[in-house]
Image (spheres, rainbow, N blue to C red):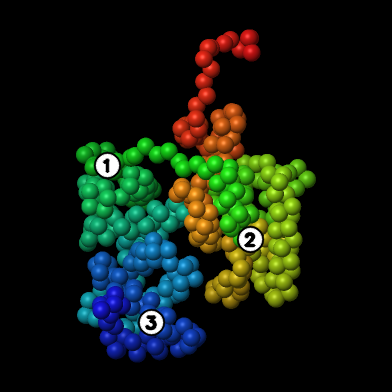
Amino acid sequence: MISRFDTMLKIPEALQKKYDRLLIQKKISADHHSDYKKWLRFYLDFCKKYQHPYADSGSLSLFLAKLEEKKQDKRKQTQAKQAVLLYYSGIGKKMETTDQVSETSEAFTAKGGQSPWNAALKSLADEIKLRHYSPKTLKSYSLWVEKMRFFVGQKLAEQLNPDDVKAFLTDLAVEKKVSASSQNQAFNALLFFFRHVLKREFGKIDGVVRAKRKPYIPVVLSREEVDRIIHCLHDPYDLVVKLLYGCGLRLSECMNLRIHNFNFDHNIVTIHDGKGKKDRTLPLPRTIAPDLKRQVERVISQHQADIDNDCAGAFIPGILEKKFKNAGKELVWQWFFPAKELTYVAETNESRRYHLHETHVQKAIKRGVSKSKILKRATAHTFRHSFASHLLQANYDIRTIQELLGHSDVRTTMIYTHTVRSRTLKESKSPLDF
C-alpha cells in the first residue's frame, strides 16, 4: 500500500544539501534536523497541491492555519514555522528546488522581498492593532484576506472590487459549503480590509448566495451530568471545569486568569479584557474555595522554582511588558493555570511560562465526556450554556444573567429561554396582588 508520505512532492537533492547546510549554520540541534526537513516537505507539497506561491509569507500563514485545522500540537506548529522560515532565508541565497519553486522564488526576490499584497496585509495588521482588537480577530481577518488573495489569482489588492467579493462569498457558500457564521466573518473581514486598508467604501453587495443559518439551541447539561464529567477529570482540568460551570466563563477567559484576578476576601473573581474588551466581576462558588486556594499554593511553589532557575517569568500582555519590565517575575502576574513546561523565546534568548493551552483542556474535556457515558455532545462552552440555563431555571432575572455572561445585547442571552421548560401561571395577576 502506498502511504500519503510516499505520494508527496520529492525535494531535489540540491535543495536537500543546501537546507542541510542552513540547519548547521543556524545551529539547529541535530536531533531536530529530520523534523525540519519533514516540515519543509509538507509545506512545499501543500503549496503545490493548493497552487500557492512557494516563497510567500501568505502561503506560510495558510499552511499554519491548515495545521491548526488538523489539531496539530502548538509546539509542532512552531517548529513547522521555523522550518519554513529557514527555507525562506535560503531563498535569498538562490536556493534551488523544483522548476516551479525556482521560478516563484526568482519572481519574489525580483520584487525586493515584499509584494504589494504583503504590504497590504501588514497594513491590515497595523489597523487591527491600532483599534486594540484581539489577537484572534487579527488572525481570522488576516486568514480571510489571504484566502481572498489566492482566490483572485494575479490581481493586486488595489484592483479588488465588489464583484470579486461577491464571487468569493458565493464560492464559500456553494463550493466550500461553509457555515453562515464563517461566511459572515469573511464578509466582515473584507469589509474592514476595504474600508481601513484600501480606503474605499465597500459598496452594496447584492445577489450573494448566503450560507443558510440554522436555528441553534445550545446543548445544556443537567447538574448530575456536570458532576459526572468533573468526576472523570483529573487535576487541574477538573478545577477548570468547575470554574467554567460555576462562573459561566468562556474557555479563553478561564485560561487567561492570573493570581491578581482573585479576591478571596470578598469571594469574587474579576475578568479583565473579556470578549469585546469588557471587564466584569463574578461571585466565586464557595464550595470550590479550598480547591482554588490549593491551586494558588501550587502556583506560588512553581513560581519560586522558576525564579530559582532564572526563568524570565510569565508572558505579559501588550505594552505592560515594556512599562513594567519585571512584572513577569512578580507573583500577582503569574497564570492561575500555568503551562507544565516553559516556552523558549528565541528573540530574547530566554524562557517564559505561558498558561495551560486551550487545546489541552478541550482534549481533556472530550476524554472526560466520553468516560462519563453521558448522551450529549458536550464541549468546554457547554458548561457556560449550562451555567446560564440553570440560573434561568432558578428564576434569576434575564438582565442579571446577561451581566454575569458579559453579553452586550440581551437578545444574545434570550437564547437560553429555549433551553429550559417554560413555567406559566394559569391566571394573570396584578403586582399589587402578589
In the figure, is residue 420 to the left or right of 303? left
Q: Earlier in the sequence, mark 2 or mark 1?
A: 1
Q: Please state, as top left, top right, bottom left or bottom right, where the N terminus lies in the image.
A: bottom left
Whether residue 315 is visible, yes or no, is no
In the figure, is residue 45 to the left or right of 386? left
Residue 235 marker:
2
**Is 188 in front, or is 410?**
410
Answer with the quarter of the image where residue 218 lies. Answer: top left
Pinpoint residue 69: horizontal percent, then vertical percent: 39, 61
Label 3 CA crowd tier, 10 Å (few <14, some 14–19, many 20+): many
Q: Residue at x 27, y 38 (%)?
A: 204
Pinpoint residue 127: horizontal percent, then vertical percent: 44, 52
Residue furthest out toward the right: 265
Q: Earlier in the sequence, mark 3 or mark 2?
A: 3
Residue under pointer 1? 210
Q: Residue at x 36, y 64 (%)?
A: 66
Q: Amino acid at mark 1?
A: Arg
Q: Amino acid at mark 3?
A: Lys
Secondary structure under the numbered disc 1 in the rendered image: loop
Whether residue 39 is visible, yes or no, is yes
Residue under pointer 3? 37
Q: CB of mark 1 within 8 Å of CB of mark 3?
A: no
Label 2 CA crowd tier, 10 Å (few <14, some 14–19, many 20+): few
